[in-house]
Structures are given as structure tokens and as C-alpha cells.
Image (spheres, coloured by chain):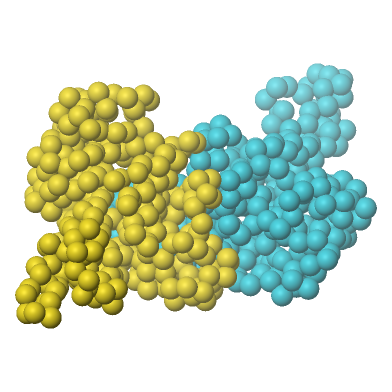
Chain colours: A cyan, B yellow
Amino acid sequence: MSLKLTILGCHSATPRVNANPTSQFLEIKNHSFLIDCGEGTQVQLRKYGVKFSKINHIFISHLHGDHFFGLVGLISTFRLLNREKELHVYGPTGIKEIITLQLKLSNSWTHYPLLFHELNSATSELIFEDAKVEVYTIPLDHRIYTNGFLFKEKIGERKLNFKAISQHKEIEICDFQNLKNGRDFILKNGEILKNNILTLDPIAPLSYAFCSDTSYFPDMIPQIKNVNCLYHETTFLKDKETLAFSTKHSTAEQAAKIAKEAKVEQLIIGHYSGRYKNKAVFLAEASPIFKNTLLAEEGKIYIIE
Amino acid sequence: MSLKLTILGCHSATPRVNANPTSQFLEIKNHSFLIDCGEGTQVQLRKYGVKFSKINHIFISHLHGDHFFGLVGLISTFRLLNREKELHVYGPTGIKEIITLQLKLSNSWTHYPLLFHELNSATSELIFEDAKVEVYTIPLDHRIYTNGFLFKEKIGERKLNFKAISQHKEIEICDFQNLKNGRDFILKNGEILKNNILTLDPIAPLSYAFCSDTSYFPDMIPQIKNVNCLYHETTFLKDKETLAFSTKHSTAEQAAKIAKEAKVEQLIIGHYSGRYKNKAVFLAEASPIFKNTLLAEEGKIYIIE
């Protein structure tokens, strides 16, 4: 069991040749989520072989252009591709007006159901849930209303301990689901077999926290505690800490501090300012503080397990 | 004297890897005009070495995404580049609301003056004029309100005929401007030297007509008569004439017919549907009807003289 994260774009501010703005594609359980959608995301999806039809849920962190200017184009392309399935868009209040105004003026309403879930809460909220996955907002501190997103697998069923079960002929296949659900088993003689004898702990659920953009913001730590993987923006290095502060961005050092304090397993950094030609400087600053740091690279796939 | 046209994108519908939607960069006299601005145009500008600071006027034909989804990103990038000069945007009514709504919600108003010239006339109008250049709308027939644009050099000053002038010692350098302006010269003895003896005709002014998107629409012919270069969309071939008709697009044959009837000097075709892998089929259909036809190619520069 693993999550699969494809980086479609990991640069800040303006799209450039070979430097695309933020967008990520996350495969978790039975879902494929698109996270942020800077200009050019649909081309990046094609370039890296992501099937458009897989995407049913798009999460937009905030309404700065490098995080959503590609959304209206993707929505329009879905229409041209004769999409019929629902598309759910989660983003700050106003995103619906922006998209629908453009669809109205171009007389290009989607034939498929386009459903907006507008966000405006200052505290974390559960915005998506099904039997296997939950998605929560992570309130961040940026120049405009911004959320990160916490993607969590739900804890699964308990695993059958066949070695233990085989010692009790009274337990039949039709009892297995009850055992997986955590129930004890009562033998005909009245003896109770505790569930934890007959089953093993379920596979540990995985989690991924996406945090872009934000100032150094320790308030997020309780929410991202122990996640398997944290993506945290590092627009600048420590030498630009004043600029990071005034523009409400983070340095590589600050991202590493957050990762360390939250005791996450892995940190991926990105959202690089164009002023740094060699991205290795971000790794050099972050990894002494948090060893398990990786650079986000366009087109690269990160397996979270 | 020549016009210089750079094709930034010439494909229809959706941006794909190496197939960008409509955008062109026209250099005419002392101006640099951007025509249409599909998603990814700012990356194309960088790729083909167009200086962003050269662009002061952007003309948008209509509000289908493949012609304007890159505009808001370009406007935002100008801001990030600390632009101070005015930017003029000419496009259908509604374009101002689309752009300003996004700038408002991202709290990213431009520091430079951003001036919209909204168009809604059903007949041609002069929308830009200075001492050397005029730009007119060309009303087209598409699914939504659409204009082409006619870019015309103004007729210049008459050229001095130095051989003729040298025979009249009374004519001094300070008289030259009057001669260029077309005035006759009166000798001291009262004799009138007609201007057309002392000067030659000015260099013939050049013109470029951009027509995308449109159904086969002969109404445009009087307006584009004898232009030096016509860009006319050819989304489809003749085998898809019914589809061209229903979607209000043109075939290569129809574009060639328009060029022939309008007696233009050169035709450039583009806005290709993605269904045709080899664009040579468009040339094969158009050139038997209008010989001087060229295919639009991304990144290619066309000199109009």
C-alpha cells in the first residue's frame, strides 16, 4: 500500500519554459486528486501521461494565479473531451464566480456536472470523505485566504490471523467479515475468543500534507504531526528571510523546522523562486535540520509508503 | 519597410505539448502588438525571445478560452516584473470583468495602468490610431461575438526627388518638409512647381488582416481587399465542411476562396484541429485555389513586405 505523488509544477510566481507553477497529482486508495492548477497544468498532465478522466476532485489552495490560472482551461478541456462525470472543485470563496463568469461569457457551459465547494473557514474542516479517504483543510498564513490540504487514508479493516483462526474449526468463512470489523468470536461452549487473538492490526494508514503557500506557521504542526509526507513551500533561502516574512512565504530552513517539530517522515520542498538557478541550495539549507528532505522536481513521482 | 509576424500558437481548442492555442506577435512601424493570448502565451513569448516590455497593446478576438485564457496570467506577470507603462487591452465586452474579478480576488491589482477597450459593435470600427498605424475591427461570424483585426500602416510622407529638386536652387532644406507634406513650391518669379515633379510617391503602406475564428464569411472581403497578408483560420478540411458549418469554423478551401476573392498578396492558415496530425493536408487543399498560401508554424517569423 502506498500513495503516489506526481509533481506537475513546483515553481513560484510565473510560468517559464521548463518551470511550471504549482500543481500536483496524488493517487491515494481509489482516488486521483489534483492539487492546485497553475497555468499550463493541462499540458503538464499530458506530458506526464496522467489520464484526464481519472480526475474527479480538484483542490485549490488559494487564488493567486500561480495556483489556479490553469483551472478554467482544464475545465473547458474536460468539456471538449465530452466528459460526463461530475467534477468537484474545492477552493476559496470566489472561485465559482471566476469560473462561471468565463463559461458564461464564452457560452461554453459544461455538459458535465461541475460542483464547487467554496471554503472560507479559519479553522480546519473535513471537506471530503468516503469509506477509505478523508481530506481536511490546513489553514495557512499567506497574503490572502489560503489552505493546505491533509489527505488521510482511513484506518482499514483488521487483518485475519489465519494461523490463529485455523486452530478453531468453529470459525467459518462467513465469520471473517465480523472478525475484520473487530468483533470477538463466541464458541459454542460460551468461551469468548478476543478479536486481537484472531486478527492482526490493519495496515497503518498513510497521510500526505500539502502546504503551499505560507509564512513560517507553527500553528499547523498539531495537524500535520507524524504525517508520512509533508510538502512545504520554500520560496526563499535564509538570506531572504525578511522578504519571505513580508511576502508571507517560507525559507528552506523554516520548512525543515516545521517538518522536524511535526516529526513527519519525509519532507518535500518546492515553490522555488526563479532567482535561484540551482535548486540544490534549498536542499543544502534544509537537510541539516531535517535529514529526510527531498527536492520537488517536475515530472518526478514520489512513492509514499 | 516590412511587418514582422511571429506565430506563438496556431492550434485550436486545447493546449497540448508542442501545440499551443492562438497567439501572434506583430511588429508594425513603431509598435509591437499581441494578438490573442491562449493559455501558455507568456511561456511562448519567452521561448521565442519576445521582450515582455515591448507589448503595450493586446487585441483579443473573442472570449473562447483558446484565444484568451493566457491573458490574466500575462497581466499578472507584467505586475511581478514591475511594469510601469500603460497596457491597453482590446476585446469583447466582459473581458474587463473577467480580468478585474481575478485581480480583485487575488488581491493583486496591477501597479501599472491597465486600460480596457471593450468592443461590441456589429460593424467595423477604428479602435487604435496614431501617426503611423491604424487598427480596425473586422466583424466575423462565429458562435460568440468575434472580431478579426486589420492592421494598416498609414500612408507616409512623399519622398523627395533630389534629382528634380537639384535643378531649382531656390529650394532649400527648410522647404523639404513642406514638399514631403505634398505642397507645391512657388518660385520667386511666381512660377508654380507642382509637388509631383519635386517628389515621388511614398512607400506603399502595408497591411495585415487577422481573421480567427469564423465561418466562411464573404462579408469580410471588402474590408480585407488587397491586404498584403491575410491570416485566416482553417480548423478543418473540406471533408468536415458540415462540422465547420455547425461550429462556425472554416475549411482550408474556404479560407483560400476568401483570399482569392479579396485578392490578398499572401495567405497564412492556422488554428488547426488536433485531428489532423500532418498539417501539410491544409496546404494541399488551399494552395490549388490560392497559390501564395503558407502554413502557420509555431515560432516561425513571417516577413510581410
Q: Determine whether, in the image, residue B69 is placed left or right of residue A63.
A: left
Residue under the point 37% across and 69% down: B88
Q: For residue B125, which quarter of the picture?
A: bottom left
Can residue B235 be seen here? The reply is no
Which residue sits furthest left?
B191
From what the image shows, is residue B219 above or below residue A48?
below
Q: Position of residue A54 (x, y in %)?
A: 52, 37
Q: Determine whether, in the image, residue A133 is placed left or right of residue B270.
A: right
Q: Determine whether, in the image, residue A26 is placed left or right of residue A155.
A: left
Q: For residue B276, which quarter of the picture?
A: top left
From what the image shows, is residue A156 above or below residue A127?
above
Near-viewer residue (A134 or A2): A2
Q: For residue A236, which quarter of the picture?
A: bottom right
Near-viewer residue (A242 or A278): A278
Residue under the point 24% across and 45% down: B229
Can residue A275 be seen here? The reply is yes
From what the image shows, is residue B202 above or below residue B263?
below
Q: Position of residue A289 (x, y in %)?
A: 91, 55
Near-viewer residue (B156 or A160): B156
Q: Determine whether, in the image, residue B83 is placed left or right of residue B188.
A: right
Q: Position of residue A26 (x, y in %)?
A: 64, 42
Q: Position of residue B252 (x, y in %)?
A: 21, 32
Which residue sits furthest right?
A288
Residue under the point 31% across and 40% down: B271
Residue under the point 48% across and 70% down: B103
